[in-house]
Image (cartoon, helix red, strand yellow):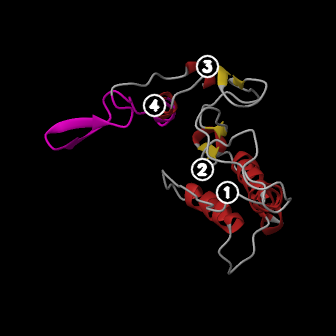
Amino acid sequence: STLEMYGAEPGKNTFANNCLLSRRLVERGVRFVQLFHEAWDHHSDVTGGVKAQAGLTDKASAALVKDLKQRGLLDSTLVLWGGEFGRTPMMQGALKPDQIGRDHHPHGYTIWMAGGGIKGGMVYGATDEFGFYAVDGKVHVHDLHATILKMLAFDHETFTYRYAGRDFRLTDEHGKVVSELMA
């Protein structure tokens, strides 16, 4: 039933199998697990591509959150899901069904988070009516990193590494914790 819930297929290299493996790693005390699914770059065939890739990731991602919750691990596990980049709200490419794509777009980006002290059941921020620019609740990447580090019990201002005689931090000289996201 667990394999079915994830859509996992033993012996295959799939995102579903990796989600199940990540749950097993978390159960065994591994503190940081990062998964990749590298097939989201749809500069053509956006309709078919997104449908196919969502089919490979949605069920397994939902199963991971459900499974962590059922096992009492979600409260102490931060799950963050994000695509490679924002996407333009208009088309790119020829006006043929298998060639229509969407280009990279840094002004309106969506992620979702669950567990680990994140406030559930909410949407934070919004884009304009075209999905082109973030207009409400803008979160800079440094703010996102500061918030993630806070959820992992790190102070982003003191979490540094020394390189070339200088202390560097993930949030550079910027970043503020977005406390509205925290439970």
What residue sits right under mark 1 in the picture? 40
**Amino acid under label 1?**
Trp
Around disc 2, counting alpha carbons within 10 Å, would you say few (fewer than 14), some (14 to 19), or many (20 or more)?
Answer: few
Mark drawn on residue 142: 4
Around disc 1, counting alpha carbons within 10 Å, would you say few (fewer than 14), some (14 to 19), or many (20 or more)?
Answer: some
Coordinates of residue 5 in the picture (x, y in percent): 82, 61
Coordinates of residue 108 in the picture (x, y in percent): 65, 33
Q: Residue furthest left?
A: 165
Q: Is residue 16 left or right of residue 146?
A: right
**Amino acid under label 3?**
Glu
Q: Is residue 69 left or right of residue 105?
A: right
**N-term mark: 2 or 1:** 1
SS at badge 3: helix
1 vs 4, front mark: 1
C-alpha span from label 2 to label 3: 24 Å
**N-term mark: 4 or 2:** 2
Work out whether 139 lies above or below 165: above
Q: Residue at x 73, y 59 (%)?
A: 44
Coordinates of residue 94 in the picture (x, y in percent): 78, 56
C-alpha span from label 4 to label 2: 17 Å
Work out whether 11 lies above or below 117: below
Q: Residue at x 65, y 43 (%)?
A: 74
C-alpha span from label 1 to label 4: 23 Å
What residue sits right under mark 3 in the picture? 180
C-alpha span from label 4 to label 3: 16 Å
C-alpha span from label 3 to label 1: 29 Å
